[in-house]
Image (spheres, helix red, strand yellow):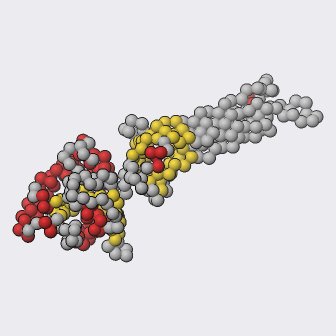
Amino acid sequence: MKFLDQAKIFLKSGDGGDGVTAFRREKYIEFGGPDGGDGGRGGDIVFESVENLNTLIDFRYTQHFKAKKGGNGAGSDRTGAGAPPLVIKVPVGTQIFDDERETMLADLDKPGMRIALLKGGDGGFGNARYKTSTNRAPRRADKGWPGEERWVWLRLKLIADAGLVGLPNAGKSTFLKTVSGAKPKIADYPFTTLHPQLGVVRLSMSEEFVLADIPGLIEGAHEGTGLGDRFLGHVERCAVLLHLIDGAAGSVVDAWRTIRHELEAYGGGLADKPEIVVLNKMDAMTPREFSARRAALAKASGAVVMGISAISGQGVPEVLRALQNVITEARKA
């Protein structure tokens, strides 16, 4: 299934049913009077977050959603039937924005959340409503009120416990494949990963977490350069960031500073999240190179720098344990 994390759709709630003009006609009752019923209420537009979806791809092919109209009234003071709500199911983590993408209308960040975004129109009054002491046979009946309509944007932010960040070709997809059952595309050129990937990491029978890999960031990503600006939102909800740095590239401190600058410039609290700094590709460095680059990175970041080889798995269990510890504390909090 292709990943799609934003979509624009048109919504219209149902119109109210029409009231009717009717009069009571029975044998031996000469002046029965008005008995036209009211129209029924139109259907609402309701969004519901469900767990078995992880993409907005369905909204690429179906972009218009219209709820049903309420039933018309009838004689004998019968009210028209109310229309059922139109329930639109979206993945957990979906945010709904107005047409200008500035105002957030809803944030469905938990399973089973429901929100009635548009209310259906009220039904029109039948002529029985207009009977008075001076107007015994009114012939007025109202049309149903129209429903609401608007264009909205859907934006999906993946729900993951940990997020992988780093420059292109840092080895993020290889790491994700090594530690989980995910099967991302892996190649030796930048931007191999074009869409966010999720993998479930299981340390034991009772310990597991969801790891998100987003396309690599480059300088200026927060302004839309490359692919990073669009996908940084997918790690906003993570409890911890795993900052993966290509140790074989040499300029490890510059790489770390580039990503940190982009996280700070993007905002959304990304720069304040717990960060585990990991130097990848130990197998492509001599012990002296690894030691020197690790020391330089530790001095610049002020953090304990861990080393791994995503290909061979060296150092990977220690990194996963560090991630799990942070995630466990976050869940308790």
Residue at position x 21%, y 55% in the image: 189
Q: Judge whether 146 appears above or below 160 on screen.
A: above
Figure quadrant of the N terminus: bottom left
Q: Judge whether 139 appears above or below 96 on screen.
A: above
Which image quadrant for residue 211? bottom left
Residue 271 in the image: state x and y as whole percent. 23, 52
Q: Is residue 142 left or right of residue 174?
A: right
Q: Is residue 7 left or right of residue 121?
A: left
Give the total of numbered labels.
Answer: 0
Residue 188 in the image: state x and y as whole percent. 21, 58
Residue at position x 49%, y 36% in the image: 150
Residue 176 seen in the current view: yes
Name the foreground residue: 79 vs 1.
Answer: 1
Which image quadrant for residue 273? bottom left
Which image quadrant for residue 252? bottom left
Residue 298 seen in the current view: no
Residue at position x 23%, y 50% in the image: 217
Residue 138 in the image: state x and y as whole percent. 77, 26
Residue at position x 66%, y 30% in the image: 143
